[in-house]
Image (cartoon, rainbow, N blue to C red):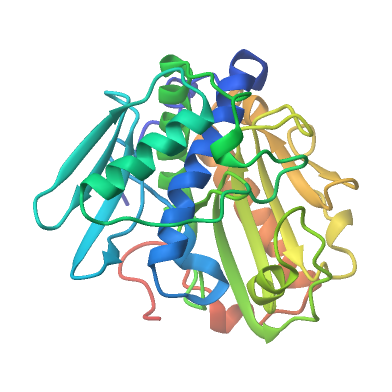
Amino acid sequence: MRRYPGTSRAWPALAYEDWSKTCSTLHLWLQIVGKIQLAQCPWINHSWHTALQVSARGLATRLMPCGGVSAQIEFDFIQHVLNIRVTNGGLVSLALEPQSTASFYARVMDAMRTLGVPVAIHTMPNELPDPIPFDQDETHHSYQPEYVHRYWQVLVQAERVFEVFRSRFVGKCSPVHFFWGSADLAVTRFSGRAAPEHPGGIPHLPDWVAREAYSQEVSSAGFWAGSEAYPDAAFYAYAYPEPPGFASVSVLPGIAHYSERLREFVMPYQAMRDTSSPDTTLLQFLQDTYQAAADSGAWDRTALEAGSGYPVRTR
């Protein structure tokens, strides 16, 4: 099995308080681009078609059909530009720099029109309290390149470990992908059984979207950079529906804990980073929380798990 650096040097420091304004602004810019993908791509179960992908330079959409051509948008967090490419050879690059969200929105829409692939999106942000329409938002305008680059580096490292975790499961499993609504990198395993109807109630998200996303039993884990409501970068894991006994399982005592408020296990990013082997700690967190969900929920683990190593049992 390939081995990679597991020390904190591979995982850069990322304190939310150091870049909170940029984090909030970037979240909105990611939503604008994500909504373009939402508008252009056919629906895939659990809204997987809307998610962005970690790329070698930042975060990118999938290839999006736009009439007779296709387009792709990529945030380049090395040179700090937004590249919009069309399969007919067209390219527009926009600088990622301090600017209002309204200005960013206008520039992106103008670029799409210039490339001959005009789009229309719903301009109200999703999953955020007190949202401001993109085209009216002069409040969020911060961009700190150093911290955006660090954030992307964390996503690269997290995706690498998440992919190892994903490889050990032969049941239905999501890709490792970035949901722009909640701004988290996530991977989700499915038990294969239907779930009770989700209650909905996620801010500025249609209930039917949440109900389709959680129409089947899941064990899900991910990473978020923090927010005003939870000002700390952290890894999380939850089960839906949450089975009896899930919350009482011991997971990495002193490093992770179960949050009654969030109804999920949480491992602060810095706490993981401070361990002697962050990679090992993260994999243990993913495995322990999955086992808590699978064992408490009576999943058929023998049928669903692949083990580790190569070759693995076929899906």
| Position of residue 178 in the picture relative to residue 299 (left or right) | left
In this rendering, the answer to whether 67 lies above or below 195 is above
| Position of residue 163 in the picture relative to residue 110 (left or right) | right
Residue at 37% from the left image edge and 35% from the top image edge: 107
Q: How far across and how far down the image is residue 103, in percent?
A: 46, 29
The mark tally for this picture is 0
Q: How far across and how far down the image is residue 139, in percent?
A: 63, 23
The answer to whether residue 122 is seen in the rendering is yes
In this rendering, the answer to whether 236 lies above or below 63 is above
Residue at 81% from the left image edge and 49% from the top image edge: 250
Residue at 78% from the left image edge and 75% from the top image edge: 297
* Residue sitting nearer the eye, 293 or 63: 63
Q: Point out the image quarter for the C terminus.
A: bottom left
Q: How far across and how far down the image is residue 64, in percent?
A: 30, 62
Which quarter of the picture shows residue 84? top left
In this rendering, the answer to whether 15 lies above or below 314 is above
Which quarter of the picture shows residue 191? bottom right
**Residue projecting furthest to the left:** 89
In this rendering, the answer to whether 2 lies above or below 106 is below
* Residue sitting nearer the eye, 289 or 31: 31
* Residue sitting nearer the eye, 57 or 104: 104
Q: How far across and how far down the image is residue 27, in percent?
A: 56, 37
